[in-house]
Image: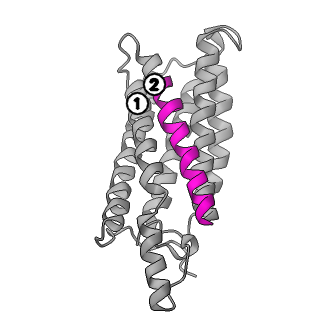
Amino acid sequence: MSLAETPALSVAETTSPAAADADAAAAAANPALLGLPTFIVGAVALGLFLVGYQPTGATAALLSIIVLSTGLGQLLATLWAVRLGSGAVAAIFGIFSGFWLTLASALYGITHGWFGSTAALPGTLTVFALSWLVVVVLLTLASLRLPLAFTVLFGLVDLALLLVFLFASGGATNTGLETMAGIVVFLFTLLGMYLFFDAMGVATGGRSLPLGSPVIKV
């Protein structure tokens, strides 16, 4: 069962041949086809940064990716979902659009002295990670009626944010926590890749990949 086919997110219910055709069209016009790959590229860039792969120009590359690809891509996927009348999908991509764009704004502002010196970075990351941790935990709990893969993905995002919060609140000196956060980012990136293969497969006429049963089935 794909994101587009999830009962809570479906554009139309299958009650007739015409409705079945509508469901097939909805699967082919799935905002996840844009939202997932743009999410993945930002997550890869962030994961590389967190595990310490920071050659010259790494910050510029990270900011460019998360603004012009990930943040913008999530926003376009949100608008696509709104156009289809799929509120839950719009909420998911809208939340992550806000996440990536505010991350870029915070990093860009700190590195250019808009919000103080770079010494303020640990405090900035602490507030950022804690604030978004609250929101993504809420999303995780609200996703319990979705296939398990989505809940697991959101849970891994929660864990990465918690590790970033612990890293930043300790003065950004414990590189072990930073590396662990990067590894968790790569884990949810892999799951995002699996979900993209599922969405693309369904959109091109294939069968949905196993995504696991929802935690809450009623």
In this view, the residue farthest toward the bottom is 16
**Can I make out residue 158 in this image?**
no
**Quadrant of image for the C terminus:** bottom right
Circle 2 crowding by C-alpha within 10 Å: few under 14, some 14–19, many from 20: many
Residue 106 against residue 135 in the figure, above or below:
above
Residue 127 drawn at (x, y percent): 68, 30
Separation of marks 1 and 2 at Cα, in angstroms: 6 Å
**Image location (x, y in percent) of residue 91:** 63, 56
In which quadrant of the rendered view does residue 181 lie? top left
**Residue segment shown in magenta:** 62-85
Q: Marks 2 and 1: in contact by CB < 8 Å?
A: yes
For the residue labelled by badge 1, is the local secondary structure a helix, a strand or a loop? helix
Q: Is residue 18 magenta?
A: no
For image coordinates 41% across by 13% down, the residue present is 57
SS of the residue under disc 2:
helix
Q: What is the three-letter code of the residue carrying label 1?
A: Ala
Residue 12: in sight, yes or no? yes
Q: Decide whether the magenta segment is chiefly helix, strand or loop.
A: helix
Q: Which residue is under mark 2? A: 62
Give the residue type that dot 2 points to: Leu
